Amino acid sequence: MAFERSAWSIFIESLVGKAGLILLLFMVVMSGYVLLAYPMDYGVRVWNNDKKWTDLPRAVPPEWWDIFDPRDLVTHRIFIDTKYDYTTEIFGMDAIVYEIEYEHTEDGFPTGLTVKYANLTVYSQFGAYVFINITRPDGTEINLFFKQEPVPVGEDISFPYTLYPEQDALIQVNTEDTTIFQLKSFLFSQYGISLNKSVIEAIGGIRVIFGTPIENENQTDFEVLKGLYKIKVMFASQDLIDVERVKVIIGGEVYGILGTDTRRRDLFQGLLFGFPIALSIGVFTSVLTTAIGSTLGIVSGYKGGKVDEIIQRVTDIVYNFPFLPLLIFIVFIISRIPDFPRLIAIIGAIVALGWSGLTIIIRSMVLSLRESMFVESAKAIGASDTRIMFKHIFPNLAPFIFAQMIFFTPGAILAEAALSFLGLGDPNLPSWGKIIEESFRGSSLQLGMWWWFLPPGLLIMLAAITFVFIALALEPIVNPKLKSR
Amino acid sequence: MELQLEVNNLYLYYKTYKGIVEAVDGVSFYVPKGMAVGVVGESGCGKSSTANAILRVLPKNTYKYEGIVKLDGINLMDLDDDTFNREVRWRKISMVFQGAMNSLNPVLKVGFQVAEPLIIHQGMSKEEAYSKAAEMFELVGLPTQFLDRYPHELSGGMRQRVVIAMAMVMNPKLLILDEPTSALDVSIQAQIMNLLKDLKEKYKMSMIFITHDIALASDISDYMAVMYAGHIVEFGPSEEVLLNPQHPYSQKLLASIPRLREDKEPEFLPGTPPGLINPPRYCRFANRCHKVFDRCWNEEPQYYKIGKEHYVKCFLHES
Amino acid sequence: MSVQRYLLTKAINLLLVLIAVLIITAVLYGATGLSDQVLRSLVDEELRGFKQGLLQQPGLSEEEFNRRVAEYEQQLIITYGLDKPWYLRMGADILRILTLDLGTTKGRMYSFSGSDRVSDIILERIPYTVILVTTATIVVFTLGLLFGVWLSTKTGTLWDRTLSLYGAISYAAPTWWLAMVLIMVFAYQLRLFPPGGLQSPNLPDDPFIRTMDIMWHAFLPVATLVLASLGSAIYVYRSILVSTANEDFVLVGRAKGLPERTILTRYIIRPSLHPILTNLVLGLAGSLTGAILTETVFGWPGMGLLYYEAIISIIEPLILGLTYIFTLIYVVARFILEVLYIIVDPRVKV
């Protein structure tokens, strides 16, 4: 009793086939999202542009790590205010106040307190003064910092004049000298504690700002003060004044879905980009390799004679090339040509070294097909060689060729990752291999920054496994030996 | 007449994930001493499984294995595996397998493979075993230089001879041959058949000759057993079964053989045998039988004796 | 065709491979202008030094200075071969390298023993790579066979499916990344093994201690290579063994009453060795080149790391020479495979 199950039903029945398809779908969706939501020059404009990342903490693990870490880790908070909350008067000047409220609940101290502002517009030579002050949960208030924002003198200066038009002003409040001084007097006036500026710096200004002192033998320690903090950033001037955006950043020990690297970059964003890169490299390389390999195999096997001889020779030679060293060498050489798109070089190199395996297999399959009846009859009818090859031989081999194509893809993905790891990848694109390379150079291993190199590696594996699963599920369908009689 | 082998109600079922395969379903027949019994039938009817059951070559998924297999009066089924292996296997009963292509271990020399049972079972030294193997080679008509050859260095016919030599090396009483010539072309087939007939004559070997080719079986067999769907449906002396088949299946089977000198057209039997997983509990040939009647659809027929040694499993001959 | 002719054909073919690789390497190097570029910068550097030297000399007129510099420049150009276009340089270079006269790095890199001859540098590093790769291969073969045999008796069970999954997954894992994971866990977190390098500094001169130290350093790299290929090896071996076990002659062996142990070794494992060995040697050739990545991660001073260093620093003679050596080793390994084919399996028709 024999019945035909369609290829599709065999495929979909196997667990690996289902898993592979789901993974593939996932990758396609992610790639699509990235291509739609991000600009094409993301790599140059954002990823490698340090200025875009200054708000984020440096080298911190993902937020969910808090569940596993026994310590209660401080979340990184970025507060953005674009309108001032109220006005007040300071030292006889009118001031606009940007106030943010911050609730500190964790057992640890924030890693820093940063204030940034952009487009500070002044209306006279007077310029402006900036004051930063903080009201703590215990009611105490510290005037942390102040500075003058003078207007540069010059003939081409006209009013209103905008300071910090391109790059935000950045004040690392907890390490500023002024702040340390202020903290010193705060400690004395509030608690009667007398500490040198250098001691305060050693302890860390942030612990004073967000903590209360506890006497400990002959040392002063600070414990965290939890509760509601009000941080006020005040801009004072004799004349009008305007600020477009104020950011207050409470430095955290964790950030985001996948943490940050040593350049403060959000790894989740960077890794997202890897999807379309991996998919496109995988697909293009395998399609090209398969196309070339099978065409040569079919022509060589069918035509025979001189053509076969030549193709066979060449194939045999290329087949014996050591893949990796030559791949590295070729990509390296091409990388020295300025402006040559690196991705194309990589795809080209992998294809150039990879087609020969398929040619050999296809050729032998064609040799056996050639003698079969339907080819004989097609020839008898007078069909041309090309026609026979395309209409008769190729369709027989198509399932096998398709499966080979799928099977080649993980190899291509891994090859690209390896090249990126060696520093030969596209310098602008954040591919997974590149991120691993950066993590390796950035001492992620020594520093235990597992979140930097584990996710990209796992993603590479995921991408490769997707195609391995699909190929495995295809095997019973396309393997001529395993076909049930 | 002395019986070399007596098989009574032999069962061999396998367990597969699709169900239980009732490959050998209550098979009975006998082999008189020095005679050859041909077992014929379509592929998948259980011929090879019967052979395996007799020699106790059981797969891991054996579900049921019981019955009576008497060799020279001793019920082999009573023997435990160790005793069977020591005293019966290959010594008293051996087998010539089909597809000599693949019956020989490709990485061992053929001489060694023939000598192997002697070394293992009888503890013979290599030299002794090899000289016995050389004897065997001569017996089957192979030059002794071939002892050191590998299977792929021999032609199909030569390989089959090696397999025969290998089966005979311990002078068994009963030789089971499972499609020994299927993979060979006709001229070689004839040579092998002559060799077998010769050996049977010279050594008074009892044989069970399994094949789907009735003409071939008739060449050497003194008795015929016709198998269908796990059962032996007819058993008796060759002339009687061949010239006067009583079971409807045997009749159709014989009618399907093209005859060289007759004008009769070979008949064709439509349909396929029932699968061996959950076979019908009535006559298994009912759906293809040209003489079927009511009772056939309700019960399984027993063996009915219709001649001195002729048995048929069909209600038509209930007596 | 006799065995000798067959092997000879193979050998010639492999020779062609070597030549082809060299040609491609040289052409790429030359046609992209890289060769000229690098040589030019070498010339410039020497000129600079020369000029410095001249400036030290008192009483040199500007005219004389320029003349001497120009003269030296000409000399340098001839020495470095810049007076000829790259394709003319190429021919001589290739012939030279084929005969294993690999030249020198002209002072741009030295071996540990201080020589700047390319062959010395490479020769020094080969043993380290060989240690790594052969140890890993032996471990994979042994474990693979053991587990493969065990697994072949468990077809269809959960074990079978789990291990085939493991095989698929380890095929997908980048070796060098695995290396990083192992380093972080075992070297930095658990502090069981060193994170890289060949030897610990300041060791006593005792050869036993030194050897142990090297082995201790080699542990993680070897473990990485093993982990990366063990999964697929087990699965491949298992498949081969199962396929052999289903062959008719195994059934015959059982019918003959051979003890199960004999069946296993003589009838299942032995006929399986041929495809297993093929797999092994193919893998060996592959892992020789794969060593490039692992050595880079571990800073293991073998050929792989050398290749990386040569490429990054663009040392042409070293790159050419090493590519040649890699290909040579690869090709020789394939050739040995052909020979082994014939020895191990008498079935191979030649």
Image (cartoon, coloured by chain):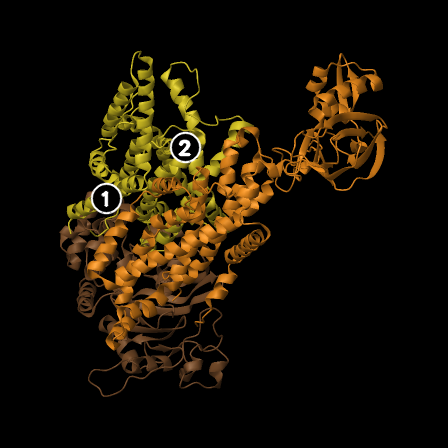
Task: Measuring from the top left, give residue A233's x and y in whole percent.
Answer: 77, 33
For mark 2, what is the residue?
C295
Residue sitting at the far front: A155
Asked if one can make out residue C18 in the rendered structure from this viewpoint, the answer is yes
The quadrant of the image that shows the C terminus of chain B is bottom left
Please give the letter of the chain rendered in yellow: C
Across and down, in percent, residue C25 comes to 29, 40
- Which is more toward the observer, C259 or B203? C259
Chain identifier for the brown-coloured part of the image = B
Please, what is the three-letter code of the amino acid marked with disc 2? Glu
Identify the residue at horizontal 20%, vertical 44% (top origin).
C11
| Residue C249 percent location from the top left of the image | 31, 55
- Quadrant position of residue B92: bottom left
Tell me the element at label 2: helix
Q: Which shade is chain A?
A: orange
Q: Residue at left 41%, top 84%?
A: B316
Q: Which amino acid does label 1 sit on?
A: Leu
